[in-house]
Image (spheres, rainbow, N blue to C red):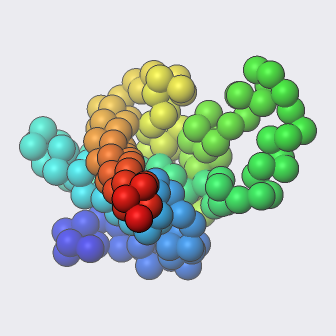
Amino acid sequence: MDSELQQLAGDIVSHPQFQQLRTLQHHGAGNTVYDHSVAVARAAYAIARRMRLSGDETASVVRAALLHDFFGYDWHGERFRRYLRRYSGVKRLMRMHAFVHGPLAASRAKHTFGLSSRECEAIARHMFPLAAMPRTRIAWIVTLADKAVASKEMAAALSGYVSLACQRAVA
């Protein structure tokens, strides 16, 4: 991690619970929640610097970006699938990972790292438009950085799947 980012959020990056994010797959094979979170923090940091935010606000952006997916469970796993099977229709939809992980990550991050209410709001609302609309610059920056990084990761994953399918079709 870059030295300035390390200064702003080294306590988060070195924390054992944050390190556990290395074990959770995220957007495609080979991409973990840890990798994604660090990439979002880098992108958010670049946006904050370009916008010439204060040092405190930049630190809040980086911390919220690092923890925006600090939900702590494997949403691809059987345990989460069993949880969803208990519901049907709209209730099931509203409990899907995309809808629930922001507030869960905010609560877990606040409990573990004692974040500010603005940082927690940025985490809880980063899934806009599936979540409430962001109300602060911090929240908008985290949301934008997450969308940009996730789009890149999903495009890479899709490209890999298409390439694999083409290889199988030729073989």
Quadrant containing the N terminus is: bottom left
Q: How many numbered marks have been drawn onto this rendered protein structure?
A: 0
Which residue, as the protein is rendered here, is positioned at the far front?
171
Location of residue 99 by image quarter: top right
Residue 148 appears in view? yes
Location of residue 24 by image quarter: bottom right
Q: Residue at x 84, y 50 (%)?
A: 82
Indicate left or right for 163 with 25 as reference.
left
Which residue, as the protein is rendered here, is positioned at the far right?
86
Q: Residue at x 40, y 24 (%)?
A: 135
Location of residue 38 by image quarter: bottom left
Q: Position of residue 153 (x, y in %)?
A: 35, 52
Indicate left or right for 55 with 75 as reference.
left
Q: Position of residue 66 (x, y in %)?
A: 40, 58
Q: Position of residue 127 (x, y in %)?
A: 48, 34
Residue 62 appears in view? no
Q: Residue at x 25, y 58 (%)?
A: 42
Q: Residue at x 42, y 26 (%)?
A: 134
Quadrant containing the C terminus is: bottom left
Q: Position of residue 2 (x, y in %)?
A: 20, 72
